[in-house]
Image (cartoon, grey):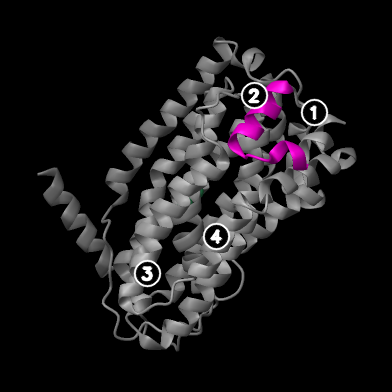
Protein backbone atom coordinates (compact mmCIF):
# COMPACT_ATOMS: atom_id res chain seq x y z
CA UNK A 1 0.00 0.00 0.00
CA UNK A 2 2.64 2.48 1.12
CA UNK A 3 4.89 1.45 -1.73
CA UNK A 4 2.14 2.00 -4.29
CA UNK A 5 1.46 5.45 -2.91
CA UNK A 6 5.16 6.35 -3.07
CA UNK A 7 5.42 5.22 -6.69
CA UNK A 8 2.44 7.41 -7.52
CA UNK A 9 4.00 10.40 -5.78
CA UNK A 10 7.30 9.72 -7.50
CA UNK A 11 5.65 9.67 -10.93
CA UNK A 12 3.68 12.82 -10.15
CA UNK A 13 6.92 14.70 -9.50
CA UNK A 14 8.13 14.02 -13.05
CA UNK A 15 5.00 15.68 -14.45
CA UNK A 16 5.95 18.90 -12.72
CA UNK A 17 9.15 19.22 -14.65
CA UNK A 18 8.91 20.80 -18.07
CA UNK A 19 10.92 22.94 -20.44
CA UNK A 20 9.16 26.19 -21.31
CA UNK A 21 8.70 26.79 -25.02
CA UNK A 22 8.12 30.55 -24.75
CA UNK A 23 11.71 31.44 -23.81
CA UNK A 24 15.02 30.29 -25.13
CA UNK A 25 17.14 28.47 -22.60
CA UNK A 26 20.13 30.48 -21.41
CA UNK A 27 21.77 28.41 -18.72
CA UNK A 28 23.42 30.15 -15.84
CA UNK A 29 25.62 27.12 -15.20
CA UNK A 30 27.19 26.09 -18.47
CA UNK A 31 28.74 22.84 -19.61
CA UNK A 32 30.61 21.57 -22.66
CA UNK A 33 29.07 18.13 -22.19
CA UNK A 34 26.20 17.04 -24.39
CA UNK A 35 23.37 14.75 -23.35
CA UNK A 36 21.66 14.22 -26.67
CA UNK A 37 20.60 10.64 -27.11
CA UNK A 38 21.33 9.70 -23.52
CA UNK A 39 18.75 7.52 -21.80
CA UNK A 40 17.72 9.24 -18.54
CA UNK A 41 18.81 7.16 -15.56
CA UNK A 42 17.78 7.37 -11.93
CA UNK A 43 18.60 4.21 -10.03
CA UNK A 44 17.58 5.41 -6.57
CA UNK A 45 14.01 6.51 -6.58
CA UNK A 46 13.05 8.46 -3.50
CA UNK A 47 10.46 11.01 -2.50
CA UNK A 48 10.53 13.50 0.34
CA UNK A 49 7.65 11.83 2.19
CA UNK A 50 9.79 8.79 2.87
CA UNK A 51 13.03 10.74 3.11
CA UNK A 52 12.22 13.12 5.96
CA UNK A 53 11.14 10.56 8.59
CA UNK A 54 14.31 8.57 7.90
CA UNK A 55 16.55 11.64 8.25
CA UNK A 56 14.72 12.80 11.34
CA UNK A 57 15.53 9.54 13.03
CA UNK A 58 19.18 9.87 12.07
CA UNK A 59 19.30 13.42 13.44
CA UNK A 60 17.76 12.29 16.68
CA UNK A 61 20.50 9.72 17.11
CA UNK A 62 23.09 12.46 16.68
CA UNK A 63 21.47 14.71 19.27
CA UNK A 64 21.13 11.77 21.63
CA UNK A 65 24.84 11.08 21.28
CA UNK A 66 25.63 14.74 22.08
CA UNK A 67 23.62 14.46 25.31
CA UNK A 68 25.41 11.22 26.12
CA UNK A 69 28.84 12.75 25.50
CA UNK A 70 28.15 15.67 27.81
CA UNK A 71 26.65 13.50 30.55
CA UNK A 72 29.30 10.81 30.17
CA UNK A 73 32.11 13.35 30.54
CA UNK A 74 33.58 12.41 27.19
CA UNK A 75 35.28 15.76 26.79
CA UNK A 76 37.54 15.07 29.76
CA UNK A 77 38.52 11.64 28.54
CA UNK A 78 39.18 12.23 24.88
CA UNK A 79 42.81 12.33 23.73
CA UNK A 80 44.00 15.94 23.52
CA UNK A 81 46.19 15.13 20.52
CA UNK A 82 43.15 13.99 18.56
CA UNK A 83 41.05 16.94 19.65
CA UNK A 84 43.70 19.46 18.62
CA UNK A 85 43.75 18.16 15.04
CA UNK A 86 39.94 18.36 15.00
CA UNK A 87 40.32 22.13 15.22
CA UNK A 88 41.82 22.01 11.74
CA UNK A 89 39.59 19.25 10.36
CA UNK A 90 36.34 20.84 11.51
CA UNK A 91 37.32 24.26 10.28
CA UNK A 92 37.53 22.79 6.78
CA UNK A 93 34.88 20.12 6.36
CA UNK A 94 31.57 22.02 6.75
CA UNK A 95 32.52 24.14 3.73
CA UNK A 96 32.93 21.29 1.20
CA UNK A 97 29.57 20.04 2.49
CA UNK A 98 27.79 23.29 1.77
CA UNK A 99 29.70 23.58 -1.51
CA UNK A 100 28.26 20.16 -2.39
CA UNK A 101 24.78 21.54 -1.72
CA UNK A 102 25.59 24.48 -3.98
CA UNK A 103 26.74 22.10 -6.72
CA UNK A 104 23.23 20.64 -7.04
CA UNK A 105 21.73 23.57 -8.99
CA UNK A 106 24.67 23.29 -11.41
CA UNK A 107 23.80 19.67 -12.07
CA UNK A 108 20.05 20.24 -12.11
CA UNK A 109 20.45 22.78 -14.86
CA UNK A 110 23.04 20.83 -16.84
CA UNK A 111 21.57 17.30 -16.77
CA UNK A 112 18.31 16.95 -18.72
CA UNK A 113 16.66 14.33 -16.56
CA UNK A 114 13.61 15.21 -14.41
CA UNK A 115 13.85 11.95 -12.47
CA UNK A 116 17.38 12.73 -11.46
CA UNK A 117 16.45 16.30 -10.53
CA UNK A 118 14.43 14.82 -7.73
CA UNK A 119 17.48 12.87 -6.52
CA UNK A 120 19.63 15.98 -6.76
CA UNK A 121 17.15 18.01 -4.72
CA UNK A 122 17.31 15.36 -2.01
CA UNK A 123 21.10 15.36 -2.14
CA UNK A 124 21.02 19.12 -1.68
CA UNK A 125 19.05 18.72 1.53
CA UNK A 126 21.50 16.01 2.64
CA UNK A 127 24.47 18.29 2.12
CA UNK A 128 22.90 21.17 4.04
CA UNK A 129 22.21 18.69 6.83
CA UNK A 130 25.85 17.52 6.81
CA UNK A 131 27.21 21.01 6.93
CA UNK A 132 25.01 22.13 9.81
CA UNK A 133 25.56 18.93 11.81
CA UNK A 134 29.30 19.39 11.49
CA UNK A 135 29.12 23.08 12.41
CA UNK A 136 27.14 22.08 15.46
CA UNK A 137 29.66 19.36 16.31
CA UNK A 138 32.48 21.85 16.53
CA UNK A 139 30.28 24.17 18.55
CA UNK A 140 29.81 21.33 21.06
CA UNK A 141 33.56 20.75 21.17
CA UNK A 142 34.10 24.45 21.73
CA UNK A 143 31.57 24.57 24.55
CA UNK A 144 32.71 21.44 26.33
CA UNK A 145 36.30 20.60 25.55
CA UNK A 146 38.83 21.60 28.16
CA UNK A 147 40.75 23.81 25.72
CA UNK A 148 38.37 25.53 23.30
CA UNK A 149 40.99 27.91 21.87
CA UNK A 150 41.18 27.30 18.16
CA UNK A 151 37.62 26.01 17.77
CA UNK A 152 36.45 29.58 18.33
CA UNK A 153 38.25 30.88 15.23
CA UNK A 154 37.78 27.91 12.90
CA UNK A 155 35.48 29.84 10.54
CA UNK A 156 37.89 32.74 10.27
CA UNK A 157 40.97 30.55 10.04
CA UNK A 158 39.34 28.60 7.25
CA UNK A 159 39.68 31.55 4.95
CA UNK A 160 42.77 33.35 6.20
CA UNK A 161 45.09 30.63 7.53
CA UNK A 162 47.38 28.76 5.16
CA UNK A 163 46.07 25.38 6.34
CA UNK A 164 42.39 26.29 6.12
CA UNK A 165 42.72 27.57 2.58
CA UNK A 166 43.99 24.18 1.38
CA UNK A 167 40.59 22.80 2.28
CA UNK A 168 38.90 25.76 0.74
CA UNK A 169 40.15 25.04 -2.76
CA UNK A 170 38.86 21.46 -2.37
CA UNK A 171 35.31 22.66 -1.67
CA UNK A 172 35.46 25.36 -4.32
CA UNK A 173 36.28 22.77 -6.96
CA UNK A 174 32.72 21.40 -6.49
CA UNK A 175 31.23 24.63 -7.82
CA UNK A 176 33.82 26.17 -10.11
CA UNK A 177 34.01 25.96 -13.89
CA UNK A 178 32.06 23.59 -16.11
CA UNK A 179 28.92 22.37 -14.31
CA UNK A 180 29.52 18.67 -15.07
CA UNK A 181 33.27 18.80 -14.42
CA UNK A 182 32.68 20.35 -11.01
CA UNK A 183 29.44 18.78 -9.78
CA UNK A 184 29.57 15.38 -11.37
CA UNK A 185 33.15 14.35 -12.07
CA UNK A 186 35.04 16.17 -9.32
CA UNK A 187 32.39 15.95 -6.60
CA UNK A 188 30.21 12.90 -7.20
CA UNK A 189 32.35 10.55 -9.26
CA UNK A 190 35.66 11.09 -7.48
CA UNK A 191 35.29 12.95 -4.14
CA UNK A 192 32.11 11.16 -3.00
CA UNK A 193 32.60 7.77 -4.58
CA UNK A 194 36.32 7.35 -3.85
CA UNK A 195 37.30 9.59 -0.97
CA UNK A 196 34.34 9.71 1.41
CA UNK A 197 35.41 6.26 2.59
CA UNK A 198 38.56 7.64 4.14
CA UNK A 199 36.87 10.90 5.15
CA UNK A 200 33.76 9.52 6.79
CA UNK A 201 34.63 5.94 7.67
CA UNK A 202 38.34 6.03 8.55
CA UNK A 203 38.05 9.27 10.54
CA UNK A 204 35.21 7.95 12.75
CA UNK A 205 37.01 4.73 13.59
CA UNK A 206 40.14 6.66 14.52
CA UNK A 207 38.06 9.09 16.57
CA UNK A 208 36.52 6.23 18.54
CA UNK A 209 39.97 4.79 19.22
CA UNK A 210 40.89 8.17 20.73
CA UNK A 211 37.91 8.33 23.05
CA UNK A 212 35.68 10.48 20.84
CA UNK A 213 32.35 8.82 20.11
CA UNK A 214 30.63 12.01 19.03
CA UNK A 215 32.44 12.49 15.75
CA UNK A 216 31.66 8.91 14.64
CA UNK A 217 27.94 9.45 15.26
CA UNK A 218 27.91 12.62 13.18
CA UNK A 219 30.08 11.32 10.38
CA UNK A 220 28.45 7.94 10.02
CA UNK A 221 25.15 9.81 9.81
CA UNK A 222 26.76 11.76 6.97
CA UNK A 223 28.23 8.73 5.24
CA UNK A 224 24.91 6.89 5.19
CA UNK A 225 23.65 9.55 2.72
CA UNK A 226 26.64 9.08 0.51
CA UNK A 227 25.30 6.03 -1.33
CA UNK A 228 22.52 8.27 -2.67
CA UNK A 229 25.08 10.78 -3.94
CA UNK A 230 27.22 8.07 -5.49
CA UNK A 231 24.14 6.78 -7.24
CA UNK A 232 23.20 10.27 -8.53
CA UNK A 233 26.75 10.63 -9.78
CA UNK A 234 26.83 7.27 -11.51
CA UNK A 235 23.52 7.98 -13.27
CA UNK A 236 24.92 11.21 -14.71
CA UNK A 237 28.22 9.59 -15.64
CA UNK A 238 26.43 6.83 -17.58
CA UNK A 239 24.30 9.43 -19.35
CA UNK A 240 27.43 11.40 -20.30
CA UNK A 241 29.15 8.27 -21.58
CA UNK A 242 26.30 7.68 -24.00
CA UNK A 243 27.54 10.53 -26.22
CA UNK A 244 30.85 9.99 -27.95
CA UNK A 245 31.52 13.75 -28.00
CA UNK A 246 32.01 13.62 -24.23
CA UNK A 247 34.84 11.12 -24.28
CA UNK A 248 37.73 13.62 -24.30
CA UNK A 249 36.03 15.77 -21.68
CA UNK A 250 35.46 12.79 -19.41
CA UNK A 251 39.04 11.64 -19.71
CA UNK A 252 40.38 15.13 -19.06
CA UNK A 253 38.10 15.61 -16.05
CA UNK A 254 38.84 12.23 -14.49
CA UNK A 255 42.56 13.02 -14.57
CA UNK A 256 42.09 16.46 -13.05
CA UNK A 257 39.58 15.33 -10.44
CA UNK A 258 41.56 12.27 -9.41
CA UNK A 259 44.84 14.11 -8.90
CA UNK A 260 43.35 17.06 -7.09
CA UNK A 261 41.27 14.91 -4.74
CA UNK A 262 44.27 12.74 -3.97
CA UNK A 263 46.54 15.72 -3.32
CA UNK A 264 44.13 17.38 -0.88
CA UNK A 265 42.28 14.54 0.84
CA UNK A 266 45.26 12.24 1.31
CA UNK A 267 47.36 15.12 2.64
CA UNK A 268 44.82 16.14 5.27
CA UNK A 269 43.18 12.86 6.28
CA UNK A 270 46.49 10.99 6.05
CA UNK A 271 47.98 13.33 8.64
CA UNK A 272 44.94 13.20 10.94
CA UNK A 273 44.87 9.41 10.91
CA UNK A 274 48.61 8.77 11.21
CA UNK A 275 49.82 11.77 13.22
CA UNK A 276 46.66 12.84 15.06
CA UNK A 277 46.12 9.55 16.87
CA UNK A 278 47.30 8.24 20.21
CA UNK A 279 46.23 4.71 19.29
CA UNK A 280 49.49 2.96 18.58
CA UNK A 281 48.31 -0.63 18.52
CA UNK A 282 50.33 -2.36 15.87
CA UNK A 283 47.26 -4.03 14.39
CA UNK A 284 45.35 -0.83 13.78
CA UNK A 285 45.54 0.27 10.17
CA UNK A 286 47.75 3.09 8.99
CA UNK A 287 46.43 5.56 6.45
CA UNK A 288 48.38 3.78 3.72
CA UNK A 289 46.65 0.50 4.60
CA UNK A 290 43.23 2.13 4.67
CA UNK A 291 43.90 3.84 1.37
CA UNK A 292 44.98 0.61 -0.24
CA UNK A 293 41.80 -1.13 0.85
CA UNK A 294 39.14 1.55 0.33
CA UNK A 295 40.47 3.77 -2.40
CA UNK A 296 42.76 1.54 -4.41
CA UNK A 297 40.95 -1.81 -4.18
CA UNK A 298 37.33 -0.76 -3.63
CA UNK A 299 37.14 2.33 -5.80
CA UNK A 300 39.86 2.05 -8.39
CA UNK A 301 39.68 -1.67 -9.09
CA UNK A 302 35.97 -2.22 -8.73
CA UNK A 303 34.46 1.09 -9.92
CA UNK A 304 36.89 3.10 -12.01
CA UNK A 305 38.81 0.41 -13.91
CA UNK A 306 35.62 -1.37 -15.15
CA UNK A 307 34.59 1.86 -16.94
CA UNK A 308 37.21 0.93 -19.49
CA UNK A 309 34.78 -1.65 -20.87
CA UNK A 310 32.80 1.31 -22.24
CA UNK A 311 35.81 2.64 -24.11
CA UNK A 312 36.87 5.24 -21.55
CA UNK A 313 40.60 5.70 -20.84
CA UNK A 314 40.98 5.47 -17.06
CA UNK A 315 43.92 7.41 -15.49
CA UNK A 316 45.83 4.32 -14.35
CA UNK A 317 49.11 6.24 -14.30
CA UNK A 318 47.77 8.84 -11.87
CA UNK A 319 46.20 6.25 -9.57
CA UNK A 320 49.48 4.34 -9.45
CA UNK A 321 51.41 7.53 -8.86
CA UNK A 322 49.13 8.51 -5.96
CA UNK A 323 49.86 5.19 -4.32
CA UNK A 324 53.55 5.57 -5.11
CA UNK A 325 53.51 9.01 -3.46
CA UNK A 326 51.85 7.65 -0.34
CA UNK A 327 53.88 4.47 -0.04
CA UNK A 328 57.30 5.25 -1.53
CA UNK A 329 57.58 8.99 -1.58
CA UNK A 330 56.39 9.66 2.01
CA UNK A 331 53.72 12.12 0.97
CA UNK A 332 51.86 12.09 4.29
CA UNK A 333 55.06 12.35 6.33
CA UNK A 334 56.20 15.43 4.45
CA UNK A 335 52.78 17.03 4.83
CA UNK A 336 52.91 16.36 8.58
CA UNK A 337 56.28 18.14 8.73
CA UNK A 338 54.80 20.98 6.74
CA UNK A 339 51.96 21.45 9.25
CA UNK A 340 54.34 21.13 12.20
CA UNK A 341 56.62 23.76 10.67
CA UNK A 342 53.62 26.09 10.45
CA UNK A 343 53.19 26.00 14.26
CA UNK A 344 53.60 29.75 14.90
CA UNK A 345 50.48 30.46 12.86
CA UNK A 346 48.54 27.25 13.58
CA UNK A 347 45.30 27.40 15.54
CA UNK A 348 45.76 23.89 16.90
CA UNK A 349 48.61 22.37 18.86
CA UNK A 350 50.89 19.53 17.85
CA UNK A 351 52.26 17.63 20.83
CA UNK A 352 55.70 16.00 20.81
CA UNK A 353 55.94 12.37 19.80
CA UNK A 354 56.92 9.67 22.26
CA UNK A 355 58.68 6.33 21.94
CA UNK A 356 55.42 4.51 21.18
CA UNK A 357 54.75 6.81 18.23
CA UNK A 358 58.20 6.20 16.80
CA UNK A 359 57.77 2.45 17.09
CA UNK A 360 54.39 2.55 15.40
CA UNK A 361 55.62 4.62 12.49
CA UNK A 362 58.65 2.40 11.98
CA UNK A 363 56.40 -0.67 12.09
CA UNK A 364 53.86 0.73 9.63
CA UNK A 365 56.26 2.56 7.32
CA UNK A 366 59.59 0.68 7.44
CA UNK A 367 62.51 3.06 7.15
CA UNK A 368 60.50 5.96 8.59
CA UNK A 369 62.76 6.56 11.58
CA UNK A 370 65.90 7.10 9.53
CA UNK A 371 64.17 9.69 7.40
CA UNK A 372 61.88 11.46 9.90
CA UNK A 373 62.62 10.27 13.45
CA UNK A 374 65.42 12.72 14.21
CA UNK A 375 63.32 15.62 12.96
CA UNK A 376 60.47 14.84 15.35
CA UNK A 377 62.80 14.31 18.30
CA UNK A 378 63.56 18.00 18.35
FE1 LIG B 1 27.95 15.49 2.39
FE1 LIG C 1 27.66 13.94 -0.47
Mark 3 — residue? Answer: 236
Circle 4 SS class = helix
Looking at the rendered image, the disc whose residue lies closer to the viewer, 4 or 1, is 1
Q: How far apart are marks 2 and 1 (CA)?
A: 21 Å
Mark 4 — residue? Answer: 102
Quadrant where the C terminus sits is top right
Circle 2 SS class = loop
Q: Is mark 1 within 8 Å of ligand 1?
A: no
Mark 1 — residue? Answer: 149
Looking at the rendered image, the disc whose residue lies closer to the viewer, 2 or 4, is 2
Classify 10 Å Cα crowding around label 4: few (below 14), some (14-19), many (20 and above). Answer: some
Principal SS element in the magenta part?
helix
Between 82 and 69, the residue placed more toward the observer is 82
Q: Distance between the residues labelled 4 and 1?
A: 30 Å
Mark 2 — residue? Answer: 278
Q: How far apart are marks 3 and 2 (CA)?
A: 42 Å
Q: For the residues labelled 4 and 1, say whether their Cβ atoms are less than 8 Å apart.
A: no
Between 375 and 221, the residue placed more toward the observer is 375
Circle 1 SS class = loop
For marks 2 and 1 on the same chain, the one whose residue lies earlier in the sequence: 1
Please tell me whether residue 370 belongs to the stretch shown in magenta: yes
Amino acid sequence: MAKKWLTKAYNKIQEMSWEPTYVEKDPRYKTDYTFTGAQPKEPMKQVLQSYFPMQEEKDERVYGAIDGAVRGNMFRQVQPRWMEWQKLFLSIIPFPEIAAARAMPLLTEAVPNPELHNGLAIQMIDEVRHSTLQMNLKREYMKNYIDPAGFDITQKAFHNNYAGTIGRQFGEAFITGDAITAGNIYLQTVAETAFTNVLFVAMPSEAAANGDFLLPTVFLSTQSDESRHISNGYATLIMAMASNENKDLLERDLRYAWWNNHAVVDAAIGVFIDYGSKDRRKDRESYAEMYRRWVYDDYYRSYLAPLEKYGLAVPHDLVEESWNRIWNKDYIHYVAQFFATGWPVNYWRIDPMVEEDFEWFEHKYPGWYDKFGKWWEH
